[in-house]
């Protein structure tokens, strides 16, 4: 699927100081990414703090992004959870006409076996009217989707088309790239190892840092995909300190602090998350000034 190659970004949900959704800022962030090289947008992923949004707010966020995007970029919708039946029901009741695929996180908290993970995604694949991208993020779910399970799903279900691999394990990423069927997309979910994954055959990234620095990060991704590794590495090395900083106190607190510096949105997050500390904001400001000077 060419629509989900290159740099996708996991959109944040900006909030006003009173905690309500800031739809104006969300429109600005969408346009900022479209204007600066982002290839596709991921709606209501974990970076969107979707777990803290009401059903009505989720629908309003979807609508704001769809309207602002106006069919300019492909959209991917996050639909996942740890209740398989509820995920299937949501797939069947959601209007997916504006989306090219769904992104579905591996079940969290329950800690299923590999067979349980397989059966969960089997139900999702059979219910989904759109292509499915698996999402492996064991740091949040407490359970890894092992490469053998990914390959089993990729072989048995034509509509499971890729994986957002965010284990942060380059050895595992290489094993995926070595063993998945031809055409199955291995997409980085870890900004720090994105370029290395692309150089090994990955299809790109669903990024957090990329939505704040879309021009630079999308250029790095494009250079990597085109084999221009020298220029890609130059950007990668320059942006590494910022990648470390935006995750230092959790996501999306860090990237929202960047958006505040860019005057695109304020830094408000919803509990149980808290905004970046004053010290981290100073470090981010300094790193941004160094990056801008390169």
Image (cartoon, rainbow, N blue to C red):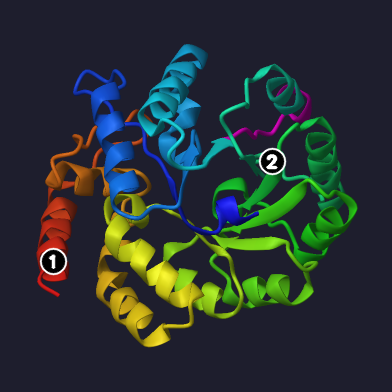
Q: Secondary structure at mark 1?
A: helix
Query: Does 232 sit left or right of 24 as displayed?
Result: right
Look at the image and tell me in which quarter the N terminus lies: bottom right
In front here: 287 or 97? 97
State whether residue 197 is above or below residue 146.
below
Residue at 30% over, 31% down: 26
Per the rendered image, the range of residues in magenta is 78-86
The x and y percentages for residue 53 are 45, 22
State whether residue 62 is above or below residue 113.
above
Look at the image and tell me in which quarter the C terminus lies: bottom left
Figure label count: 2
Query: Does 180 sit left or right of 282 as displayed?
Result: right
Residue linked to disc 1: 292
Q: For residue 84, what is the image quadrant?
A: top right
Marks 1 & 2, CB-CB < 8 Å contact: no
Q: Is residue 83 magenta?
A: yes
Residue at 35% over, 29% down: 68
Crowding at dot 1, Cα within 10 Å, few <14 / some 14-19 / many 20+, comes out as few
Q: Is residue 169 magenta?
A: no
The x and y percentages for residue 136 are 63, 53
Residue linked to disc 2: 107
Crowding at dot 2, Cα within 10 Å, few <14 / some 14-19 / many 20+, comes out as many
Q: Secondary structure at mark 2?
A: loop
Q: From where the camera sits, is residue 215 visible?
A: yes
State whether residue 264 is above or below residue 286.
above
Query: Does 182 sit left or right of 238 as displayed?
Result: right
The x and y percentages for residue 185 are 66, 61
Residue at 31% over, 71% down: 240
The x and y percentages for residue 159 are 78, 45
In front here: 261 or 232? 232
Q: Real-space Cα distance between discs 1 and 2?
A: 39 Å
State whether residue 198 is above or below residue 266.
below
């Amino acid at each position: 699927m060419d629509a989900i190659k290159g740099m996708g970004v996991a959109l944040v949900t900006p909030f006003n100081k009173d905690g309500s959704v800031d739809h104006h800022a969300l429109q600005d962030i969408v346009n900022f990414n479209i204007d600066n090289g982002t290839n596709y947008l991921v709606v209501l992923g974990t970076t969107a703090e979707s777990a803290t949004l009401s059903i009505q707010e989720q629908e309003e966020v979807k609508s704001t992004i769809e309207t602002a995007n106006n069919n300019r970029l492909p959209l991917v919708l996050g639909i996942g959870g740890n209740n398989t039946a509820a995920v299937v029901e949501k797939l069947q009741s959601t209007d997916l006409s504006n989306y090219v695929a769904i992104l579905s996180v591996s079940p969290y908290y329950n800690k299923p076996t590999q067979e349980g993970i397989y059966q969960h995604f089997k139900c999702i694949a059979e219910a989904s009217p759109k292509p499915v991208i698996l999402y492996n993020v064991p740091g949040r779910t407490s359970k890894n989707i092992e490469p053998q399970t990914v390959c089993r799903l990729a072989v048995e279900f034509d509509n499971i088309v890729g994986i957002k691999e965010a284990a942060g394990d380059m050895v595992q990423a290489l094993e995926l790239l070595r063993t998945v069927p031809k055409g199955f997309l291995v997409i980085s979910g870890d900004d720090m190892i994105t370029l290395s994954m692309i150089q090994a055959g990955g299809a790109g990234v669903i990024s957090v840092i990329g939505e704040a620095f879309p021009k630079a990060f999308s250029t790095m991704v494009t250079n990597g995909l085109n084999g221009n590794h020298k220029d890609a590495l130059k950007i990668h090395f320059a942006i590494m300190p910022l990648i470390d900083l935006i995750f230092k106190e959790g996501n999306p607190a860090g990237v929202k602090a960047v958006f505040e510096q860019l005057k695109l949105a304020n830094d408000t997050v919803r509990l149980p998350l808290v905004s970046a500390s004053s010290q981290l904001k100073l470090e981010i400001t300094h790193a941004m000034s160094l990056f801008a000077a390169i």
